[in-house]
Image (tube, grey):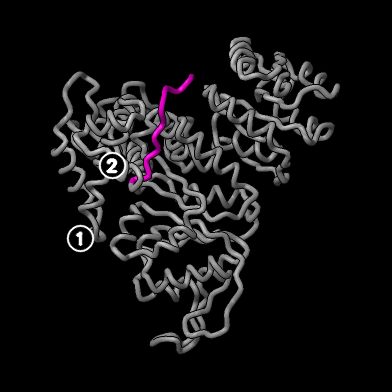
Amino acid sequence: MPAGTILIADDDAAIRTVLNQALGRAGYDVRTTGTAAGLWRWVTAGDGNLVITDVILPDENGFDLIPRIKRVRPELPIVVMSAQNTILTAITAAERGAFEYLPKPFDLKEVTAIVQRALASTKKREPAAQVEGSEERLPLIGRSAAMQEIYRVIARLMQTDLTVMIMGESGTGKELVARALHDYGRRRHGPFVAVNMAAIPKELVESELFGHERGAFTGATNRGIGRFEQAEGGTLFLDEIGDMPLEAQTRLLRVLQQGEYTTVGGRTPIKTDVRIVAATNRELRQIIQQGLFREDLYYRLNVVPLRLPPLRERSEDIPDLVRHFLRKAAGEGLAEKRIDAEALDILKHYRWPGNVRELENVIRRLAVLHSGDVISAATVAAELSEPPKMLAAADGEEPDSLSAIVEQHLNRYFAEQNGRLPPPGLYDRILQEVERPLLSICLGATRGNQIRAAHLLGLNRNTLRKKIRDLGLEVIRGIRME
């Protein structure tokens, strides 16, 4: 007996065929149609246990169809497919009541897993307020697989107040993600308050966060309002959480455990209603081992971990980002510019140690300083902050040695500290930056076989297992079905 009946609407016959075959082999009764009208007839007749629909159908937009289905069949789960893979697509799918958003091209194993979860679920999503705006105003740009997962997580978190830990290198857009979590969540009408822990003197962090009473310390001539009080009813974004002093960590832990805090110099507990989103570009587990970060606080903050990929891991997003930044520059009064294909190719092969922030700065400089209407490859090559030898070998040349690349990376890192020494633990952080991709690539080459990977690396198997656990690597066996 079939495990359930799945109704599929997509105007692409090839996609209908692929889904029909894959889900049919998984034991489901599958019906496919190329129109919204065909899907609507089945739904109103009471047929089907699950709907999978494309957004763009020849006779109706799939997003407009979802509310009508929900009115007549509120219990029927709906999965939305789309090739327009932006954060707005994921958010709109969630706000209309879809069970899940599935970007194209999709993974057949993932489709089957989503179908199983949807059929097993009887929960209905709480409707969210309509999100307004166009793609031009999106907080996050990119259609890569890595960004699709970020969008989907944000969509799933829309109607929750779960604490989120955002991890990623400097310049990857951690605050943009935090703002998206706020702006598309149920606290959107409350304040969004951002605090950078690394920018506050350690002796003032507690006062900055929790406020202080008059006379609490020298110079406290009046009562000071803290960031928790400013963010009441909204979201507090704690950037560079790894730089928070231990004393302030203890206070923050109390907030997360009991929902209350006391001001510096105060005695009366103050109840608070604030959602916490934290971010870091450091490996917190290493800081914990150094005794600089509380392990219990880490687990309280790391309820939903969200890793932002560096730009070099999603280079296919660079053309969209470049066009976005050029449009943004034109909107600020600068002359409109275009960029040629060869220039884009150079940008895609650059390593971008400063990530999206560095890319935006480069494009802004080009828009300001370049006099022509079209930005050429020669102009881009001359503008990039690193020498051409840091570019990936697009012309067949061999890249520099690993030691030379590490040396240049460290020189840039120290230069970015503006004369200050970086936080302690640099040795372990640099080793991990090399160790993580090394282990990931070897595990991928051996298809997740840890015995073969250990032999390839020249490590004891138990040592490899410990490193995988310490680095938080995900080991996937087998080959992805496309």
User: Image check: 376 left or right of 262?
Assistant: left
What residue is shown with label 2? Answer: 462
| Amino acid type, callout 1 | Gly
Q: Could you tell me residue 147's position as x and y percent?
A: 47, 35
Verify whether residue 160 appears in magenta.
Answer: no
- The reply to whether residue 106 is visible in this rendering is no
Q: Dot 2: what SS?
A: helix
Identify the image quadrant of the N terminus.
Answer: top right
User: Image check: 79 left or right of 70?
Assistant: left
The quadrant holding residue 474 is top left
Q: What crowding class fits label 2: few (fewer than 14 Cα within 10 Å), some (14-19), or many (20 or more)?
A: few
> Residue at point 31% right, 21% down?
342
**Camera-nearest residue between 442 and 373:** 442
From the viewer's perspective, is the residue at label 1 or at label 2 nearer? Answer: 2
Q: Could you tell me residue 443's position as x and y percent?
A: 32, 31
**Camera-nearest residue between 415 and 261:** 261
User: Image check: 126 left or right of 205?
Assistant: right
The quadrant holding residue 93 is top right
Q: What crowding class fits label 1: few (fewer than 14 Cα within 10 Å), some (14-19), or many (20 or more)?
A: few
> Residue at point 26% right, 60% down?
423
Verify whether residue 475 appears in magenta.
Answer: yes
Q: Main secondary structure of the magenta part?
A: loop
> Residue at point 61% right, 12% down?
21
What residue is shown with label 1? Answer: 419
- The reply to whether residue 24 is visible in this rendering is yes
**Which residue occupies the extreme bottom position in the image?**
215
| Amino acid type, callout 2 | Asn
